[in-house]
Amino acid sequence: MSLFILTFGLLILIAAAMAVGVIVQKKSMASSCGGLGSMGIDKICDCDDPCDKRKKRLAKEQSWRENQIL
């Protein structure tokens, strides 16, 4: 049981050290491949004319942004 606790503690210590490293560097998290931006896609849905369901969702998100209290 003590080996399990020691291993778990070491795992937590390593995860905490990585988190502190990210915070200290003040860099945003990024994928190793560059994500969709590396392929020239600026958004998830790269359609010229999105479907009606997506249009409704985008309109709703836009209204939320306009009515947001900062």
Image: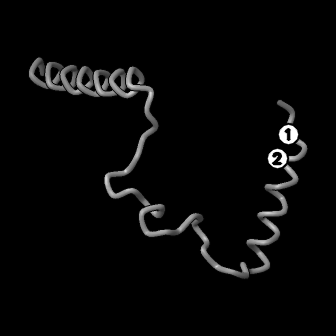
- Whether residue 40 sits left or right of residue 21 in the image: it is right
Who's the residue at 47% across and 64% down the image? 36
Q: Quadrant of residue 8?
A: top left
Q: According to the image, label 2 marks what residue?
A: 65
Who's the residue at 84% across and 63% down the image? 59
Residue 48 at x, y percent in the picture: 69, 80
Q: Secondary structure at mark 1?
A: loop
Q: Is residue 67 above or below residue 23?
A: below
- The color scheme shown is one colour
Q: Which residue occupies the foreground of this view, 43 or 67?
A: 43
Q: Quadrant of residue 67?
A: top right
Residue 7 at x, y percent in the picture: 15, 25
Q: According to the image, label 1 marks what residue?
A: 68
Give the number of the disc on residue 15.
none
Who's the residue at 60% across and 74% down the image? 46
Look at label 2 and name its amino acid.
Answer: Arg
| Real-space Cα separation, disc 1 to disc 2, in angstroms | 5 Å
- Whether residue 15 sits left or right of residue 49 in the image: it is left
Residue 22 at x, y percent in the picture: 37, 28
Look at label 1 and name its amino acid.
Answer: Gln
Q: Is residue 51 above or below residue 19?
A: below
